[in-house]
Amino acid sequence: MQTENIRAAAAMSLAVVAFVAQDAAMKSLAGGMSMIQALALRNALVTLVFLGLAAATGALRQWRTLAEPLIWGRSAADTGGTLLYMLSLTHLPLTLVVALNMATPLCVLPLAGIFLRERLGWRRVLAVLAGFGGVLLVLRPTASGLSAWALLSAASAVFFAGRDIMTRRVPARVPTLLVGAVMTAVLMGVCLIWTGWEGWTPVSPAQWTAVGGAAALIAAGYYLAIVATRMGDLSLTSAFRYTALPWGAVWGYVLWGEVPDALALAGAALILAAGLYALYCERRGPRPTASPEPLSV
């Protein structure tokens, strides 16, 4: 399990890079297109990508595994979390939305101990709590300092934590590509119905470029995140979601001039240190005697 956890941590770190870059691409569309329509178009492209890869690799032949209820449960949780997260993104700075979403690992931690029976040593708990402390340094929340959109953004972390718990329980025989295809298709369906009620707007070539870029990034991020969550201990891999904060700060500054202050920079440094410390503790841990069930692509 030690090697799998290290690989899972690397996969989650790369997934975070892709996620934050696509957040920036989607936020850039906010002025000229409904976020729901953008999500519908993005997920239509991603669903086609996942289905195409599943057909090319032979994973599509295992379509009967989609009868697993956890696949649909995690897709519903992801849909709820994504809608809250992306809608709040149109009203809040990117750095703030990313920071609020960093509550996901803290929500995952007790759930992993309860439902997955993962051993949560005090060092791992300390690392996750330290990372959340870095988030608080960035936010410096007060009773009057958080808007309704900020609260909705924070609430998305609860949905994402539930999604991750269910992802970890999905049987290894279910191909990751099919897990991703179902997830993106469910969100696409919800957004298509929503957009049909709101009404469609014409899409310019520049907007198609942004949607296409976001689709490629989110497809890579989804796949890497699913692999990481199914492969490694959830309480460890979740800590690496904290690395989204510095990436959010970079994109926020480059595209919208968002400049983090000294406390925000200190918080980002603490978040990175916490993730690295969690990985260091894992590498020093004892080696397991049994091998996990092989994971299907």
Image: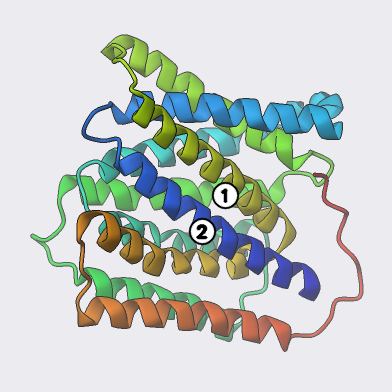
What label does residue 256 carry, if any?
none
Q: Residue shown at 55%/40% (left/top)? A: 216
Label 1, on which residue? 221
Q: Position of residue 263 (x, y in %)?
A: 23, 81
Question: Looking at the figure, which quarter contains the N terminus?
Answer: bottom right
Label 2, on which residue? 16
Q: Position of residue 118 (x, y in %)?
A: 67, 67
User: Of helix, strand and loop, which one carries label 2?
Assistant: helix
- The residue positioned farthest toward the left in the image shown: 144
Q: Residue shown at 38%/43% (left/top)? A: 25
- The residue positioned farthest toward the front in the image shown: 205
| Apparent side of residue 292 relative to residue 42 in the rendered image (left or right) | right
As drawn, 118 above or below 231: below
Question: Looking at the figure, which quarter contains the C terminus?
Answer: top right
For residue 70, say whether it is visible: no
Report crowding for label 2: few under 14, some 14 to 19, many 20 or more residues within 10 A (C-alpha). Answer: many
| Apparent side of residue 274 relative to residue 69 in the rendered image (left or right) | left
As drawn, 110 above or below 61: below
* Badge 1 amino acid: Gly
Q: Position of residue 130 (x, y in %)?
A: 42, 81
Q: Residue shown at 63%/56% (left/top)? A: 115
Answer with mark 1 or mark 2, whichever residue precedes in sequence.
2
100, 246: nearer the viewer = 246
User: Of helix, strand and loop, which one carries label 1?
Assistant: helix
Q: Position of residue 160 (x, y in %)?
A: 48, 48
Q: Residue shown at 52%/48% (left/top)? A: 162
281, 289: nearer the viewer = 281
Tell me the quarter of the picture where residue 144 sits.
bottom left
For residue 262, say whether it is visible: yes
54, 286: nearer the viewer = 54
Report crowding for label 1: few under 14, some 14 to 19, many 20 or more residues within 10 A (C-alpha). Answer: many
Kindly indicate whether the residue at mark 2 contacts the one at mark 1 (C-beta within 8 angstroms).
yes
